[in-house]
Amino acid sequence: MFSSGNVTSRVFERQIRSSPPGASVNRARKFYENLVPSHTLYDVECPDHCFRKFTEDGLFLISFSRNHQELVVYRPSWLTYTSVSDDTLPPLPRRASRFDSFFTQLYSVNLASANELICKDFFLYFPSQRFGLFATSTAQIHDSAPSPGAVPGVPSIDKITFVLLRLDDGVVLDERVFVHDFVNLAYNMGVFMYDDLLAILSLRYQKIHLLQIRDSGHLVDARAIGYFCREDDELFLNSNSQAMMMTTTQDKNKQQNREDDGDNGLNHTQLNADNNSFLSGIKQRLLSFIFREIWNEESDNTVRVQSLKKKFYFHFQDYVDLIIWKVQFLDRHHLLIKFGSVDGGVGRNADHLPAFFAVYNMETTDIVAFYQNSAEDLYQLFEQFSDHFTVSSSSPFMNFVTSHSNSVHALEQLKYLKNKSNSFSQFVKKMLVSLPFSCQSQSPSPYFDQSLFRFDEKLISAADRHRQSSDNPIKFISRRKPETLKFKIKPGPECGSADGRSKKICSFLFHPHLPLAISIQQTLFMPPSVVNIHFRR
């Protein structure tokens, strides 16, 4: 790495010394220690929009209108101006404090109908083709009427529409509609993207819809995993059910003949088609895997039976009642599925509820691993290989998001929390509650690289979440000795808020590779936001 912290020395050193194999990008990111957003424009004049995020490649800024009907897309630009002053840092012109000095509006597209609203917390980006996936929905119905195949207790949404749009020109390419269903759209929790594959989890009907995003911009159904696991499962069951119905009809005719001969039929039972209902395919595979795992733990048949009674049959109904909470791709052939109770699937605070993780092979339709949320072996995998859970994008910028498997500083912080915890089992549950990870939920900005900067993660982090606002500026301190203050980010008005009683939240949008950031502060009652732009002069 560089021996000097001076940017000029680093440029000359880069010319005469080559980087080690595989370290060229990490070495280039060291320049961000010198290129920081050192200047802030407070309370910038900007449109009254809900700003969502920068795309992974930094080409677009995604925002929505306040009525949640229109998508507004901006192109980030850079502040340019001329000055006749001889000062090293001349005062900025008045126009510089306007939003359109940094961003150029490309277009505005109406995505939602009259009774639908855009989900402002949902957005997925397909970087290779510059496609954006958005979602609109009607109001949520909590006390919805029971429906065949639906899980009781899960709310319903009359209409959910996923819209695939080309961000270069705002053309809608394809749509996919779910009717009387429920998909958790908050922070992309119910949808996961891996390369050109898309997984949409229907909580209400416990079905994982797998779609492929074609280069032409079409959403093509690939498979549905839930009640059926293979493409021909439904055909097989329907053909067998027809044979069973024919057998049932023959039995009824024989019984009717016996009743006509004087038998009152009290000692005969009738086959009811409702009693032939099966568990879903994914649930049957889960139960069979648990059974085999317990069976293979012991070699003595007597001990096996006792172990099955205690570990399997005693908890059989609990396993049957499990529903899928969340899902993510591990690769193109494996899914990580989180199971739990109905309350945890729709509630916000499910940390204290028991949960289970299963690894599902989509090719063989088998469960290949099963863990409880307190399993130490799963935690060890999470600690050592967390990049395999988080990296799911073909964008090169996302490969450098800090985790405790690629950063010594993040690993030290994790070990500090582990040693500080009173119960290791509770610590494991707390760490694994983030699995499966939400897709594209972290910023790839180098200013969140913990090998370069140190900051208070309670106030700001790479995670895509709103945070409680602080009146004090957030400091970014260099990891390089002597660990000097590099820059500060202060949300809200420059002189602080006059109303200290109202609770304020803030969000931060960092550009993936430019020294540019937006901080947005607002109260819980959503009055006009205070937007600050942080950039390098």
Image: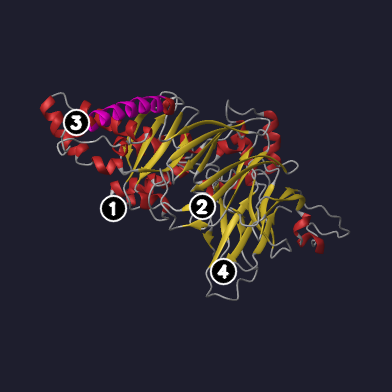
Judge whether residue 45 is colored magenta. Answer: no
Q: In this view, does 472 lie to the left or right of 362?
A: right
Are there few (<14), some (14-19), or many (20+) residues within 10 Å of tag 4? few
Of marks 3 and 2, which one's residue comes earlier in the chain?
A: 2
Where disc 4 sits, the SS reads loop
Of marks 4 and 3, which one's residue comes earlier in the chain?
A: 3
- The magenta stretch spans which residues? 236-256
Q: On the image, numbered disc 3 is attached to which residue?
A: 258
Whole-percent x, y for residue 152 in the image: 37, 50
Where disc 1 sits, the SS reads loop
- Residue type, label 1: Asn
Q: Is residue 173 left or right of residue 524?
A: right
Are there few (<14), some (14-19), or many (20+) residues within 10 Å of tag 2? some
Circle 4/circle 3 CB separation < 8 Å: no
Of marks 1 and 4, which one's residue comes earlier in the chain?
A: 1
Q: Which residue is drawn at 62% across and 66% down?
A: 492
Circle 1/circle 2 CB separation < 8 Å: no
Which disc number belongs to residue 157? 2
Q: On the image, numbered disc 4 is attached to which residue?
A: 525
Q: Which residue is drawn at 66% across and 30% down?
A: 215
- Residue type, label 3: Arg
